[in-house]
Image (spheres, grey):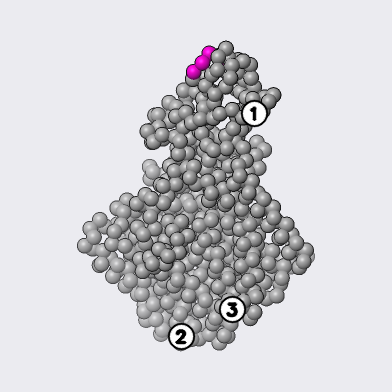
Amino acid sequence: MIKNIIFKKTWFRHLLLIVAIALLFTLPSLFYGVFDAHDVKVHLLWSNSFAEQFWQGELYPRWLFDANFGLGSPSFFFYPPFPYYISSLFHPIFFSDSSGWMALAASCCLALILSGINTYFWLREIAKEYAALMGAIAYMILPYHLTINLYLRFAYAEYWAFVWLPAILYFTVRFLKGIKLSLIGIILSYFLLSITHLLTFIIFAFVPIFYTIFLAKERIKMALFILLSLFLGLGLSAVYWIPAITMQENISTHFLWKEEGFLYQNNFLFLLKQFPDRAHFWNYLELLTLFVGAIAIISCLSIQYQNSSKNKQEIIYWISISFASILMMIPFSQFIWDKVTILQKIQFPWRFHSLLTLSISAAIALVFSSLELDSLKNIRKAAIALILFSISMTVWISYLMYPTRDSAFLIARVFLFFSLALLPIFASLLIIKSQLENQQTLLAIAISMMAIAICLNGGWAIQNKFALGLVFNDNIHKPSRVSEILKLKRDPPEYRPKWLPDEIWWSDKEMQKLSTSIYGADIVSGQGKISVKQWKPRNVILETNATTDIFVTVRQLYYPGWVAKIEGNYDSISLYPDRGLIGIFIPKGKHRIFVKLTVGFAERFGQIISIISVIITVRLYKHH
């Protein structure tokens, strides 16, 4: 009886459809992998290392003990940990997969499911159920979310960040409706976003606050509560971001902020100057921006048909966010980036596509929510015209995605892009006007046409990547070849401790030579013997028996926080960087030496701030 009642619920059937769509669109990653994506090798390495240390009992692995040819890495002093906790939970399930890929792919599948579910529940608060379903599906499969972040870039943390944006908005809307306990949901969602992808947090942080100011009755009071939630969410995650921000002088962050390819002013869309090796990706982003912008334009036209002032305000707000997102991705906004310096940490202005995807999904849901379905006439003919035109548009988009190195064609290409973006607006009117008399419905179908064209193009990118699932492309590495890909376990250059010389870091041969030249710990100068009694992350125990003072090198990269103490008096003995590794002067005689990467001031301060924030959040919960 209970089962039948649940299945009759519309929301339950909608959730089943969301889950089915998420599984369908992530099947290629589960069966064939995405091993030619931009960053997949790094995330696979981190996922495996993080999971290994987590299941060995380290609750927050910051120092990856086996990375960089076994020399160690400080990656998770700086990179957000949450997505790797999720992939770690899948590792025991896929214990037979030695590559670790299935755990990572399952995590990606779960992220898409949760993003759709959270978006659905958020949009149900501001739109009708069927419209919320359409908006949630759009949010899941619009290309920046799915095609770019999963299949082209494998931006694992940014991809997971899409889960929390609608969750924050869901609790925000509920809070504005008078459900005070939703404030705790806002705090926790902000916390999860900040430990998932701090750059997306920067992009999105004030959107719920502006939403409250624009739509709430008690605007200032409610906005202050949301602002308090933001700061408490940040406080909860201080254990992560305080070390991440304050310890950057210990690594090679100049690769992030000074290299030409990473400078924000060189990464606006529609620039005359582009990097040839990124032209294909650039074209795709530009086309996507224009097509999604066209949906925003059509949504603008629908505002005049809104009967409810509340619904009209909602649409105006999200369309405004869409246009603001587009503005932030093009060169006209450079003066904003120059003035608001924290934005420069985002590196790539086109990351605002995450906010654009969210706002357009809301606009789609709100426009369709305002429709009267009984007014649709000859919908089958209209649907056929819509699908055929969308497919033809997809062919043209695919053709124009290919890069041109000749700058003389840039103006013509941009003109074609704009024509392509605006064409469906007029084409939908011409094709469907004879079928439908309701102008509001015409605009909604025009939005459908644009959205389907974009999603079909995303589907085209996926099937092209996987060669229709037959994996003809030699650049695609099956899981059986993962061991070859991960052989070096090399970190990105920005996470290299600055004490490791360039000539060693940039040479695989020299890195391997450095690693294999030391068996745990070796005596470099002096007479005696040394043995390794314990070899664990952040914790090494050595035993020495020396007739003279000795200098010992440990096979881990030097990094602030490593200390060495002699058992008995526990006085610290001096550490030095030796070719980038830990070097220790040890007095003669028999000694047991404890070498540990201690919890430094930044880590401890972050823990204290997080504990204080937990206490305040619990008190707020009890108060409500």
Q: Is residue 307 left or right of residue 514?
A: right
Q: In the rendered structure, which segment of residues is drawn in magenta?
A: 525-529
Q: Considering the numbered disc 3 on the image, is that residue within a helix, a strand or a loop?
A: helix
The picture places residue 44, in percent across and down from the top left corner, at 51, 43
Dot label at residue 439: 2
| Residue 252 location, quadrant | top left
Query: Is 526 covered by the magenta stretch?
Result: yes
Q: Is residue 486 visible?
A: no
Q: Nearer the viewer, residue 11 or 567?
A: 567
| Figure quadrant of residue 162 | bottom right
Who comes first in sequence, dot 3 or dot 1? 3
Q: Horizontal and vertical percent for residue 326?
A: 42, 68
Cα distance in 3D space between marks 2 and 1:
81 Å
Q: For numbered disc 2, what is the local secondary structure?
A: helix
- At horizontal 39% and vertical 77% (from top left) the residue drawn is 425
Label 1 SS? loop
Location of residue 594 by image quarter? top right
Residue furthest to the left: 408
Q: Which mark is residue 466?
A: none
Q: Which residue is mark 3?
A: 215
Q: Depth check: 541 or 104 in front? A: 541
The residue singled out by tag 1 in the image is: 571
Q: Quadrant of the C terminus?
A: bottom right
Relative placement, left or right, of 316 versus 566 is left
